[in-house]
Image (cartoon, helix red, strand yellow):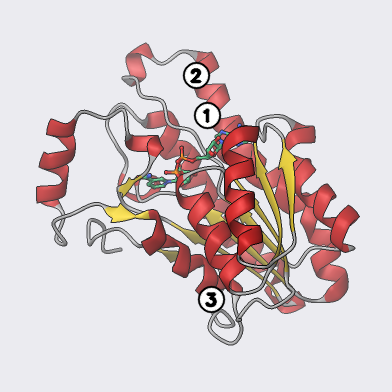
Amino acid sequence: MQLKNKRAVITGAGSGIGAAIARAFAEQGARLVLADRDAVTLANTARHCRELGVEVVESVADVGTVEGAQAGVDTCVEHFGGIDILVNNAGMLTQARCVDLTLDMWNDMLRVDLTSVFIASQRALPHMLAQRWGRIINVASQLGIKGGAELTHYAAAKAGVIGFSKSLALEVAKDNVLVNAIAPGPIETPLVAGISSAWKTAKAAELPLGRFGLAEEVAPVAVLLASEPGGNLFVGQTLGPNSGDVMP
Ligand SMILES: NC(=O)c1ccc[n+]([C@@H]2O[C@H](COP(=O)([O-])OP(=O)(O)OC[C@H]3O[C@@H](n4cnc5c(N)ncnc54)[C@H](O)[C@@H]3O)[C@@H](O)[C@H]2O)c1
């Protein structure tokens, strides 16, 4: 019970990595606000977490809007009187060659995958700074480090998340608010379900580990960063559960 009674917000908790983090946090006793734009999948994750015996509040919102990005934190403060841990995980993936990328695709990506991280963090910070305890965990991607063809907008957003996490970490570490990023490699979730199996097989063969990761193998990294004493010395780091694809 490493997170007993901690008040945590997890965005994108309806599916994949966010759902796995929600379950892992529930196993560790955290009180949860689970946020997602998909009410049905969100309710499913929330039910699993409640079965593990913790209090869960659902927040259905689109983090691509200012109000939606603030909603998880606001719900947590309203229901639990504050916030201890914020996991900015919600994200989307579209693909196009840069030459074909529309400004709408670019702006949508930046809004959902990057601006939401800034807005939610800014909303949580006054509470964390006042109580001199907080953990912000931002889910980036290894593509923010190594880049990806047909993914200039995604890689730019995720590189932005890493730069944002380092810079905010420098601002608030002395107030005992620790900010870090997780940069997963390829993980079997609905996000990558649309990619051709031929590409996936070739990609898996390229990985030193020889396989994609599972969401359940990423979630313990978030637990570590959120926990004490395990997470105490991580400041502005980018942890890479990536099957060995990137070795920074
Ligand atoms: N799967 C991978 O290979 C991989 C690799 C590196 C990084 N990531 C990152 O991990 C995070 C989680 O991805 P995943 O693989 O679990 O994907 P997923 O599609 O399984 O889950 C993403 C969740 O975010 C929600 N979401 C998307 N846009 C939203 C919005 N505007 N507002 C609210 N909720 C929204 C979706 O409804 C979904 O429940 C993302 O930030 C993604 O970029 C994934």
* Placement of the N terminus among the 4 image quadrants: bottom right
Indicate left or right for 153 with 27 as reference.
left
Q: Quadrant of the C terminus?
A: bottom left
CA separation, marks 1 and 2? 6 Å
Residue labelled with disc 1? 109
Contact? badges 3 and 2 (CB < 8 Å)? no
Badge 3, how many Cα within 10 Å: few under 14, some, many 20+?
A: some
Q: Find out whether the residues at labels 1 and 2 contact each other: C-beta distance under 8 Å.
A: yes
Which residue is labeled 2 in the image?
105
Which is nearer the eye, 48 or 72?
48
Point 65% across, 73% down: residue: 29
In space, the residues marked 3 and 2 are separated at their CA atoms by 34 Å
| Image location of residue 54, percent across then percent down | 70, 66
Residue 177, by quadrant, is bottom right
Residue depicted at x 61% and y 84% = 228
Mark 1 residue element: helix
